[in-house]
Image (tube, helix red, strand yellow):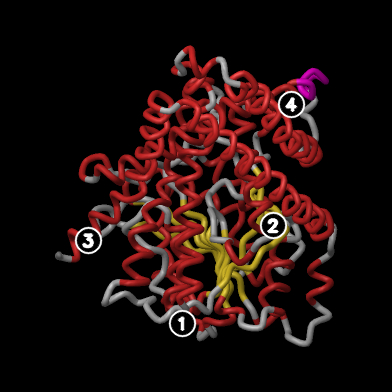
Amino acid sequence: MTEKIKSRLLEIVPGFLVWLTIIGLVVLSVVKPLWAIYFIIAFDLYWVLRVLYMLVYLLSSWRYYQRDAKTDWFTQLKTLDKNYQDYYHLIFLPTFHEPLNVVELPFTALINSNYDLKKFIVCLAGEERDKDNFLDIARQIKEKFADKFFNLIVTVHPQDLPDELPGKGSNTHYAARQAQHYIDQLGLDYAKVIVSNFDIDTCVHPQYFGCLTYKYLTQPNPTHASYQPIAVYNNNVWESNPIVRVVASSTTFWLFTDLARPERLFTFSSHSMSFKTLVEVGFWDKTIVTEDSRIFLQGLVHYQGDYQTVPMYIPVFMNTVDIGHFWRSLKNQYKQMRRWAWGVEHFPWMVKQFWFKNGAGRNIPLIKKIYYLWNQTEGVYSWATAPIIILLGGYLPLFFAPDFDRTTALFQNSPYVLAFLMRLAMVSFIVIAVLYTLMLPSRPKHLTLWSYLIMVLQWVMVPATLILFGALPATDAQTRLMLGGRFRLGFWVTEKK
């Protein structure tokens, strides 16, 4: 069997498992409805226990978040034996078609950082496909901000380069190679350059770079680690519609739970790492959609398992997908979730790197390979199937059961059991709703107090959003990978306003 056929079969596996589960549940509900009821009750019980278990991690992360956001990390940094002034921050801000008022946001946040701005090398990375618009914006950005930093670099990623997928990965790959030439001219030690790859709407917390540098300098092996902050979608939260707010907050609180479990934490969206590491692993992958999480796996494989993601309980603030148009915003939300779910493309890559004959990660300890592959596979599988089984699956056997089965105690009591389990799971969502409210920025003056009531009532939509913007886009992504060819996803740039 050729490598190409093996790779294609691996791409089929995740989608096949999802559809096998969905079709199997329907068939079981028709053929053996009581068996289906037993399975769904057991599955729901497992997930309720899992949700309550994850709530413990969420509250643990929340405690660290409250502590770290109030810490003066720049002052803490000055107490270390290592001199922070020996280190520079290389910050990438890739952009495509964004207007000036969006591009200005991260720069304004940077200059408000509690850090020495003369240690910042900022790279504004545009695309040749948007050259005229980008260069005009870059000129205005340089006029306003260039003198604030050590340097502000502007790069234009050429279009139609061979072996590239247009998107953030290929843009930052090109920009990082250009920045490497500049760093070489300065004669800087790669290990003393800390890279941050941000989305263009990423506004850092004032303590972000102090915390990042402190973590880097106190890490036993800082070049064998990525550094992951909390993504909080608060930039335009008051102007966003309630559905988009609920979906965006689910990402934030998912990150909260994973930050408390760094052994399973991947990089996501905006993240940081050593420039030495970035060069050694070959920069961000320019051929895929989900380069943000792949870069962690590149480090894991390159260093034969001796790589980790260090949690940072400091937020970076980003935009929701709301652009002021209700239905278009919902469409964009679906596309964004589907793009994130395209992280399923890591599954065939991981198997090839871990177990194929020429795989670079074959010498990673077996337990670690199994652990990371299981986390990746189970994560994308549950993303697509769990909401459907929990919220819809319980109705199937009740609908298809014959009259004889309807007289059993199990059938009669199953709706009450399932309803009880769902109410128990809602405890977690109530906690999340409270924490979410505490994280909100100040209410704009033009909005009334009724806006707070909507912020509370929006959480009744959680079951619907879990399916419409969770299970469906995840199933869509895995099905597209399974079908291959013209169904494969390219990089979709989220509209920002």
Q: Which amino acid does label 3 sit on?
A: Lys
User: Pointer 3: residues within 10 angstroms few (<14), some, or many (20+)?
Assistant: few
* Span highlighted in magenta in the image: 446-453
Who is closer to the viewer here, 130 or 264?
264
- Which marked residue is nearer to the observer: mark 4 or mark 1? 4
Alpha carbons under labels 2 and 3: distance apart: 50 Å
Alpha carbons under labels 1 and 2: distance apart: 25 Å
Question: Does dot 1 land on a helix, a strand or a loop?
Answer: helix
Left or right, 47 with reference to 6: right
Left or right, 104 with reference to 165: right
In the rendered structure, are the residues bearing label 1 and label 3 in contact, judged by CB atoms less than 8 Å apart? Answer: no
**Residue of label 1:** 185
Q: Position of residue 258 (x, y in %)?
A: 63, 56
**Residue of label 2:** 111
Q: What residue type is labelled 4?
A: Met
**Residue of label 4:** 455
The mark that comes first in sequence, 3 or 4, is 3
Q: Position of residue 128 (x, y in %)?
A: 33, 51
From this view, report whether residue 408 is shown above or below residue 47: above
Q: Can see residue 497?
A: no
Q: What residue type is labelled 2?
A: Ile
Kindly identify which numbered label has been placed on residue 6. 3
